[in-house]
Every structure is written in structure tokens, then in C-alpha cells.
Amino acid sequence: MNVRTRSALKLGLRYAIAIAITLFFLFPIYWLFMISFKTADEIYAYPPVWWPSTLQFGSYAVLFRDGDADTVWNSLVVSGVSTVLAMFFGTICAYSLARFRTGGDHLANWIISQRMVPPIAIVFPVFLLYVWLKLVDTYAGMILLYTAFNLPYVIWMMRGYVLDIPVALEESALVDGCSRWAVIWKVVFPMCRAGLFATAIFTFVFAWNDFIFALVLTRTEVTTYTVQVTHYFGGQSNFWSKISAMSVLGTLPIFVIVGFMQRYLVRGISLGAVKG
Amino acid sequence: MSDLKISGLHKYYGALHVVKGIDLDIPAGEFTVLVGQSGCGKSTLLRTIAGLEVADKGAIEIGGQRVNDLAPRDRDIAMVFQNYALYPYMTVFDNIAFGLRARKTPKSEIGPKVAAAAKMLGIDHLLERFPRQLSGGQLQRVAIGRAVVRNARLYLFDEPLSNLDAQLRDEMRGEIKRLHQELGKTMIYVTHDQIEAMTMADRIVLLREGVIEQQGAPLDLYERPATRYVAGFLGSPSMNFIPAGVVANGAAISVRLGDGTSLPVPAERAVGLGTWQGKPLMLGVRPEHIGPAGRDQRPGLAPVQAVVDLVQPTGSRSYATFQLGGVAAVAELQAHDVSRPGERLELSIDMNRTVLIDAATEKVISS
Ligand SMILES: Nc1ncnc2c1ncn2[C@@H]1O[C@H](COP(=O)(O)OP(=O)(O)O)[C@@H](O)[C@H]1O
Ligand SMILES: [Mg+2]
């Protein structure tokens, strides 16, 4: 066997393994999607139906008709707005921590420690507070909560990215005619764009995936999709078609975002990984 | 008129006193080089002038206006940094135009200005490239372009050539000097390299541990150093320092070295030296002022015997190391005046060009 065929074989094997692993991890998602398109009989059929005879959109139609799908919109609003807010304020805080050494050596560590608090530990105090502030089941309340909860993460990540920017780049801009704000806008943001996007995606996903806060702090107005899904787990029977259709609706935005941002995501994560 | 006037300037980093009372007056259009060992506070001084560090005490005036409390952008300065400080996500054009845009220069003026600056620096063919596509020398040209495209009053350079290799450094040295002649702007240039200082400066300001040791034209400092530190800092190989004393014999004064060698001092340079009899001194001799005996017949040449320990040829010249007055001394000779270690040479020291230093204060008493 010559060297060329051997390396071709090696490559082939590598691909085969990669594909196998991908299929393995994709299968549950495939199954989730398929259930949402099946008839009730197909869902419970044994042996399982791998591909429904016709794609049924009935479950989706029901979700939209009953207004259940609006919960995805609620999730989008609270996650999206809180991400924008957390990124904006978090980056400014991070800049201050990194460049002006605000709070000395330890403030940054204290801030990230806040992110480690388990949500369940604070959700009931927050609930009582929100009752008093009349924020339960409001957009403002949920946005405020997710913003606050994500800020430490944003600050920590962005601080790392800012520290990676050579100070001379900023000083050069200051001398050349920029104010501090202009420096942040024209130098800091572009310099850590990859990190910014990666952090924003994680921030969004944290909020998007949250269950416990939404469960306790919402009622009917701003129910998020994660809470909505649980409504379909009944005492006697589970509404599998609704569960899966709702889950698909909840997964799609993430697919879209990650698809668009993949480039930044990979670069941003590896950047952060090296520098910390 | 002076473009930059600094008085009584102090700068601390926490408890670390870095700039310790600097007074400096730089006339318009002059090329001043701040030179000194690494860590002596050159960058700190420059950054304080730029407003990137806050002065703890003292005043800084640019163009007659006190600027202590002005932001960097309001000081009418342009600065070139050691590591280029170019924006990786911008083309060369945008990098050079950055300062113009930040100052809201009309769009119609930006194009021509950038083109002119790029042409002056020979980088007009690179304007569409990104910094990562350029070599070190090209990067430095772009960085300089960023500064000269702006019509600032004061140009500051912080070791702009120290990242370049030797040949490129020589080339860029000439380039910056030429720029200064073309633009006629006031420039302050920081370096730790005494050759850069000597070759580029209209005036050298030699810093030592946060204070000005001496300032003046390059040859003034070279020929009439005020202290042993200055004498040793400028020149390569550096000046030989040999423990010595003076001996008066009537009106005639001679320098006596530790090994008994006696070197007569020319009469016109001996004035006042008699009072130093009996005090420990140091004789400072530059390597190029030690040559083969007998070649010249000028007055003031003092013969010495030398046994060569080490020969370092450079091509045009050879450096010979030998023992003189108990210490190793270096002579700069013609390439073929010395061939091998162990060789005996008849050398002569040009006593017209030596300096005498008070060993106690390290101040030059006669130069
Ligand atoms: N930001 C800073 N914080 C604390 N010490 C500093 C800072 N910058 C410089 N120093 C110290 O100040 C002294 C002078 O530094 P610098 O001005 O950079 O010297 P040079 O440019 O002459 O090499 C050095 O001892 C250096 O360690
Ligand atoms: Mg320096």
C-alpha cells in the first residue's frame, strides 16, 4: 500500500467516524421533528415509523390557532431585549473593569461568582419582590431579570476580550481625536466582534432556555415557550404531537441564529478559551 | 518660539517616582531625541506630554498653552507607537484616514491627504491592503503615515524602529529624518539606542533615572559630556575609563595612571587642573582617540605601550583590547594596524580629546 492510498484511507475512516457521531447526536432532533409531522397512530406505532407517510401540519395549525405559538414570540422578546441590554451594559462595565481597573483586583471575580448562584435559590425572593413591584407576568419584569442574571457572564467574558486588545490601539485613537466613547465604538467593538457575537449568542440561549424563572414569574401574559411545553404533559396522556411541535418552534430560532453566527461562534469561543 | 515647554514635571506610578523634575524647552521645528536606558522614564515622559498619563506635578505647555488638563485629542499632537498600533480590521487607507475622520475632516479632503501622505512614505500601492498583509517595515511606514497625515503641532515617536531588523532600521532612520526636513515640524523621538540619537537628533536630551543628565547638540554631548554617565552612554565601543590622578611639575601637568604611566596634558588644557592634585580622578579616552604612535606628529599625543589581549575586526576598523593603567582599554585602529593577540604595539593617546572625571562625583572636570 503506498503512502497516498494510506492517507486516503485514513481520511475516509475519519469521515466515517465523524458522520457516525453526528448521526448519533442528530437522531433525537430528527425524531423530535418527525413526531411533530406524524399522525397520532404513527406516533405510537410499533415498530416505529421512521418517516411519516404524509407530513401532517395539524399540530402546528392548532398551536397557532389557540395562540400557544405566541409563547415563542414572548420568549423571543424577553430573550432578545435582555440580550441587547446585557451586552450593552455588560460591555461598558467590562471595559471599565479592564481598563480603569475599577474595583481593584477582586471586583471582577466577585461579579462572576454571582453567575454561579443557582436560579432556584433566588427565584422565590425575586418572586416576592416582583409581587411587591407589580412585575410578575410582565415583559419588563422578565427582561429585567434575564438582563440582571446574564450581566455577570457578559461582564466576565467581555472583560477578557477587552484585556486582549493592545492598549496602544486605544491610545493611538485617543491621540488621533477620539473620545473614550468613540474609542469603545470604533476600536473596542470591532476588535472584539467575534467575542461579542459569541457572548451574545450564549446570553440569548441562557435566557431562551430558562425554565425556572419563567415558571414562577409568569402567568398568562408573557409565558415563555419552555413553560408552555410543560402544559402538554397531562395527568393521563401526554400530547406528544403538541409537545414536539412546540419544541420544534422553540428550537428553530436557535438554529437560525447559530447558522448565521457560526463563524463568530467558533472564533469567539476559541479566543476566550486561550485567554480566559 | 517654543513649541513645547515643560517645567518641574513629576510623575509617579503609585509609590514609584518615575519622572523626577524635568524642565525642557523645545523650539519649534526641532528634532529632539529623548535617549536613555530602558526604564529611565522616556516613555512615561512622552506619554505625559501626550496626555496618556496625568502629570502629578509641574506644567506642560504646547504652543504656549497649558495642556495639563486637556484630553490627548485636544493637545494637537500626533504619536507613533512602538508596535505600530494599526487597526487589523481596517485597510491601510482607513488606518491612515482614521485621525482625519475622527476629527471630522470633510470627505473630499481625506482622499487627497491620505494619498499625499502615502506617496511621501512610498506606500501608495498598499492602500487597499490590510495590516496582516504587510511586512514590518511597511507597517511602520503606515504607522508614520497615520501621524503625518494629520497637521499636528507636535509629533511624538516612542521607539518606532525597535521592532525592525538592523538594515531596515538604518533605512527608516534616514526616512524619518527626511520627513522632518520636508515637514519642518517639531518632533520628539524616544529611543534607547545612542546611535539613533546621535544620527537623528538636532538636540539630544539624555535621561537617567527620571532626570535630565545633559542636553545639547549630539556632538556637544559627545565631545563635552558633563558626567561620566553621558561620556559612557554615547559612543560605541564606549569610552575607556582609567583610574588616574594629576601631577603638577611647575606649570606642566600630567595625568598619572595606576601603573605609573605618565601622560602629559597639553598646556592649554591644563588650566586649573593643579587644584585636583591628590584627588582620585578618572581619565576618559574614546577608542578612536588611541592610535598607532608616530603616524601623527601633532602636539598632545602621549605614547603608551600596549600588549594586545583581544582583536575584534569589523572590516573597516579593528578594535584592540589591552591593559592600560590596570583596566582593560579598547583602541579603535585601522584594520591592518593590529593582527593578533599578544602583539606589542606602540600607541598614542590624543590628550587633546580626553576628559578628566572627578571619581567622587563622576562629574567631568575637564574636557
Ligand atoms: N503603567 C505603569 N505602572 C507602573 N509602573 C510603570 C508603568 N509604566 C512604566 N512603569 C515603570 O516606570 C519606569 C519607567 O518606565 P518607562 O517610562 O516605560 O521607561 P522607558 O520608556 O525609558 O524604558 C519603569 O521602571 C517601569 O517599570
Ligand atoms: Mg519605553
Image: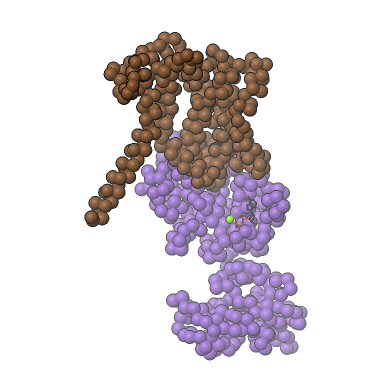
The answer to which quarter of the image holds residue A163 is top right
Instruction: Say which of A204 and A169 sits in front.
Output: A204
Determine if residue B2 is in view.
no
Say whether residue A106 is left or right of residue B73.
right
Residue at the limit of the structure toward the top, as seen here: A65
Residue A234 at x, y = what percent? Answer: 48, 15
Q: Quadrant of ligand 1?
A: bottom right
Residue at figure coordinates x 47%, y 54% from the top left:
B179
Counting labels gives: 0
Residue A111 at x, y = what percent? Answer: 63, 36
Q: Which chain is brown?
A: A
Q: Which chain is purple?
A: B
The answer to which quarter of the image holds residue A35 is top left
Image quadrant occupied by the N terminus of chain A: bottom left
Residue A173 at x, y = what percent? Answer: 53, 42
Determine if residue B20 is in view.
yes
Q: Is residue A4 above or below residue B248?
A: above
Residue at figure coordinates x 63%, y 52% from the top left:
B44
Instruction: Say which of B113 and B267 sits in front.
Output: B113
Residue at figure coordinates x 54%, y 13% from the top left:
A221
Say whether residue B16 is left or right of residue A177.
right
Image quadrant occupied by the C terminus of chain A: top right
For the rendered model, the colour scheme is by chain
Q: Is residue B315 above or below residue B171?
A: below
Residue at figure coordinates x 25%, y 53% from the top left:
A4
Residue B112 at x, y = what percent? Answer: 41, 41
Residue at the limit of the structure toward the front, as seen here: A46
Instruction: Say which of A134 and A31 sits in front.
Output: A31
